Amino acid sequence: MGGHSVRAAAAAILTAALTPAAPATDVYPLEEETDREYGMDLVQLAYDRDARAVWDGADRGVRFAMGSLNVRQWYFEPEVKFAAPFTSWLRFLYRFERRQGLEPLMEERYRSEFELESRVWRWFYAGLRVDPAFWKREADGGVSLRFRLDRTRYLDFGYTALDFDNNYSFERSAYDEGYTELYREPPRRYEVAGAWHFPGGLAWKGEGFIRTTSVKNYTYFDDADENHTRRYNERYVTTTVTQPLPAAFELFATFTANRWEETRRYTGPPLTRPPLGDDYDGRLTLHGYGGGVYYQPAGRHRWRAGFARRYQTRNFRFTGWPYESYDYAKGEYVYDALWRVRAWRELYVETGYLGERERTDRTNVGNGYVETKVLYDNRLPIALEYKFGPTYSLKMASGLDLDRRDWGAYLIYDKAYVHVVACF
């Protein structure tokens, strides 16, 4: 691949990675924008157990998470949910979510979804969903089937037609954008989510989806860009299990898996299309699991210890240019021990220890060159949380680096996190 095309591709990929609510036409970045403390950042970005319980137990609420991903980028995730009954068998639902960050891998990073849900019979419900967009071709629509006994025992099944108006919008509109993007195989998503409480206190919660393979043809007028075809699919699943134990202990375990695949092929005439090296096949996987224990006796104190393992792989093959092809693997172990105390009224202070071991391996397929790095990071996390009421809270967190190389350079400069939860 020529230097110019490499730089152009890198610029386009970086732009896609930094764009909020990336549309389905953008590709996931070939290279990471994460720093060496990314795993620890995710631990501090995660909502606390109590905040998640408040959110799950409310029909209406707002919550907001913001935090530092590295010295260049911030993470934002505002969420809104609203439910209002019309009658005893019909209610209106609204969900808003905008995730601006480096994960998860899914392309649908923006949702503003309306739903009418009807009670069909006893514990069975059916819903009709629509997620409108300014560009109608980006609108989604779907149906839902639910079995729900209460907030802790339910199963949801969904089918979503992604970009269902795309081809109609391009083919029937007189608005000339200088290109067309027509699906040869439209994307569809099959979703499942659920939660259940079992005898003895065991609780399970999880969700997942399969996005079927879609094929889209990109055609540009007046040689504005090179015509190409994109094939894409994705699978995702996550689950959490908790088990209370005697003496105020509680065990928890989590598992997450995400698989993303993409193929790009240029379709222009041989004399005008770019070199074959710009065609590629890419696969990205991200697996994570972890667990730990909470100990919360009666009184002001709570202790938590946890462990998480994250493993990511990226495999890219560039047609005709094997020296550009590569395999990449990144494994992270993140471990923490935290102590929280109620310092004054509803003001809580949390501190302890947070550490990470990271190993990365990159192999250049063309010449077999392998680069390996093993890094260790340690942090003293500090958090303040104030609960304004049973369903209102504000949490601010930061931390101090405990590694010699960071002294005097960063300290708390690039570590700041905020959570706001308000449910009604």
Image: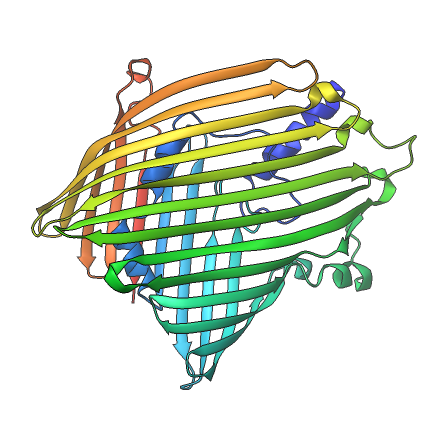
x 57%, y 26%: residue: 328
Residue 172 occupies quadrant: bottom right
Q: Residue furthest front?
A: 199
The picture places residue 167, in percent across and down from the top left corner, at 76, 60
Q: Quadrant of the C terminus?
A: bottom left
Apparent side of residue 264 relative to residue 54 in the rendered image (left or right): right
Is 149 situated above or below 160?
Answer: below
Q: Nearer the viewer, residue 193 or 187?
A: 193
In the picture, measured across the screen, residue 354 lies left or right of residue 128, that is left
Q: In the rendering, at what x and y percent does residue 108 appear?
A: 56, 51
Q: Where residue 251 sits in the image (x, y, percent)?
A: 25, 47
Measured as percent of width and height from the top left, residue 214 is found at 71, 51
Q: How many labels, in total?
A: 0
Residue 102 visible in the picture: no
| Foreground of the two, 364 or 25 | 364
Image colouring = rainbow
Residue 303, picture quadrant:
top left
Residue in the image at 64% along x and 24% along y: 326
Tell me if I can see residue 108 in this picture. yes
Q: Is residue 373 above or below residue 129?
A: above
At 30% from the left and 65% from the top, the residue drawn is 57
Query: Taking 329 as reference, is 385 above or below it?
Result: below
